Amino acid sequence: MTTTTIGRGVRYGEQADRALDLWVKLSRAHASFSRRSEAHIRSFGLTPPQFSVLECLGHKGCLSFGELCKKLMVSGGNMTVVVDNLVKEGLVERIRSGTDRRRIHVALTAAGKRLIGRIFPRHAEAIAAAAEVLSPTEQEWLAALLKKLGRSIQDSASG
């Protein structure tokens, strides 16, 4: 495939054009969905990373610092700052392992459990409202396709 000019109407081949069109639409949908979600999260006085930690611990329970980073797909350096701020606010606590002092777990405090218990249902409703343009069947179909796409890309990168 050869392209001689760059500009409007340039084509890169049927397969590439289709994939590029998908990428643009996926990126724009993700950006729109993320902006709506982040605005809703900020209305609770939290940053999106803080909310993510509270939500993860609320649904998964106490996790090691490494497990939390892996679940949220963030680096330890970024997570340290987020957890530090949540500790200062009394929403999470660090718990040292009894058998390995280097291993640290993060858990919700009673105040953190109350907060996520109060705000998560409202956030779930906001996400449902944002997705309601798609029927329930379309939402399930799109979720399955995105999972397939994501796993395929992940598998090809690691293999």
Image (cartoon, grey):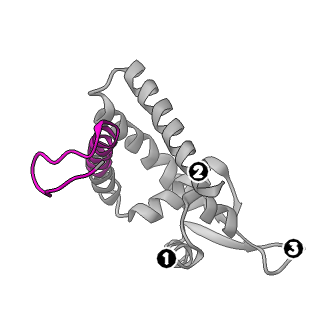
Q: Is residue 115 left or right of residue 46?
A: right
Question: Quadrant location of residue 51?
Answer: bottom left
What secondary structure is marked by label 2?
helix
Question: Quadrant location of residue 26?
Answer: top left
Mark number for residue 36? none
Q: Amino acid at mark 3?
A: Gly
Q: Amino acid at mark 1?
A: Asn
Report if residue 84 lies within the magenta region. Answer: no
Picture coordinates of residue 1, whole percent (x, y): 30, 47
Residue position marked by numbered label 2 in the rendering: 156
Picture coordinates of residue 148, whole percent (x, y): 53, 36
Residue position marked by numbered label 1 in the rendering: 85
Q: Is 20 situated above or below 41?
A: above
Q: Is 75 situated above or below 101?
A: above
Q: Which residues are magenta?
A: 2-31
Q: CA distance from mark 2 to mark 1?
A: 37 Å
Residue sitting at x 27%, y 55%: 39
The reply to whether discs 1 and 3 touch (Cβ–Cβ < 8 Å) is no
Residue position marked by numbered label 3 in the rendering: 98
Residue sitting at x 51%, y 71%: 86
Q: Looking at the image, is mark 2 or mark 1 earlier in the sequence?
A: 1
Q: Main secondary structure of the magenta part?
A: helix
Picture coordinates of residue 159, whole percent (x, y): 66, 54
Q: Which class describes the residues within 10 Å of circle 2: few (<14), some (14-19), or many (20+)?
A: few
